Amino acid sequence: MPLIRDNDLVAQDPWVRVDDGAALPEDGTPVIVSLGRWRAERETLDGRNGRLGVVLKAGDDAAELAGDLERLSLVALEFPKFSDGRAFSTARLLRGRYRFRGELRAVGNVMRDQLLFMHRCGFDAYEVARDDALEAWTGALSDFSAWYQTAADDRRTAAQQRGECAAPPLSQSRARIRANAAAASAPPAPAVSCCAGDWAY
């Protein structure tokens, strides 16, 4: 299956996906195993002379890999069908919360219409089941030119580009938080009665 990585088509993928129960290559070939196999054979896999990757299915919890990500060179996230977007959330967790910096690969039902959003969530490799994979990828990146939200790809939002929403310095933000907290804890001001004669025109 064609593989796109780092904005280019990979001629030969060095990674081999090894099914549960199948023998591991002995020549140091990089392998991708299931989360279940990683749980059961952690020490054996960690001791191999070769790079290691783990594939997570849509229902797998990324938190199970949180303490092992430094050992992994690749995490593959499976998209079982178009309507199942759980892998998008898992990608954001891996890149944002767990700071995974290895290869994040989209596998399974990877469709052209989702490529750009996968990229924004932190994916940098994609198994695309179509002959024009590179052309599809290049076209997907240009589908939109403006964004309203920040994401893992660090693109500037439309507001930031217009200069209307520059974030205040952190010290100002903290001062504002303290001022709001103080105002919320202060006793309410006494009610003042007035009549029309007190109004200034």
Image: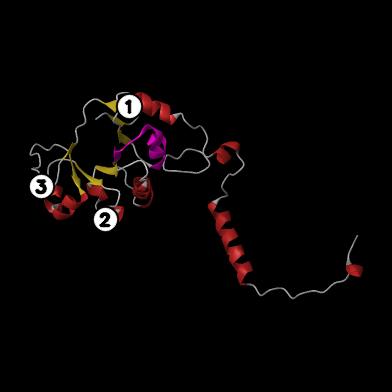
Q: Are circles 1 and 3 on residues that touch, CB within 8 Å?
A: no
Q: Determine the secondary structure under disc 2.
A: helix
Kind of residue sitting beneath label 2: Glu
Q: Are circles 2 and 3 on residues that touch, CB within 8 Å?
A: no
In the picture, the disc for residue 84 is none
Crowding near the residue tagged with mark 1, few <14, some 14–19, many ≥20 C-alpha atoms within 10 Å: many
Separation of residues labelled 1 and 2 (CA atoms): 32 Å
Q: Splitting the image into 4 quarters, where does residue 199 fall?
A: bottom right
Which tag, 2 or 3, sits closer to the chain's start?
3
The nearer-to-camera label among 1 and 2 is: 1
In the picture, the disc for residue 64 is 2
In the picture, the disc for residue 133 is 1
In the picture provided, is 86 more to the left or to the right than 75? right
Q: Is residue 131 above or below residue 75?
A: above
Kind of residue sitting beneath label 1: Ala
Query: Residue 61: horizontal and vertical position, in percent?
Result: 29, 54
Q: Is residue 115 magenta?
A: yes
| Quadrant where the N terminus is found in the figure | top left
Which tag, 1 or 3, sits closer to the chain's start?
3
Q: Determine the secondary structure under disc 3.
A: loop
- Magenta span of residues: 104-121
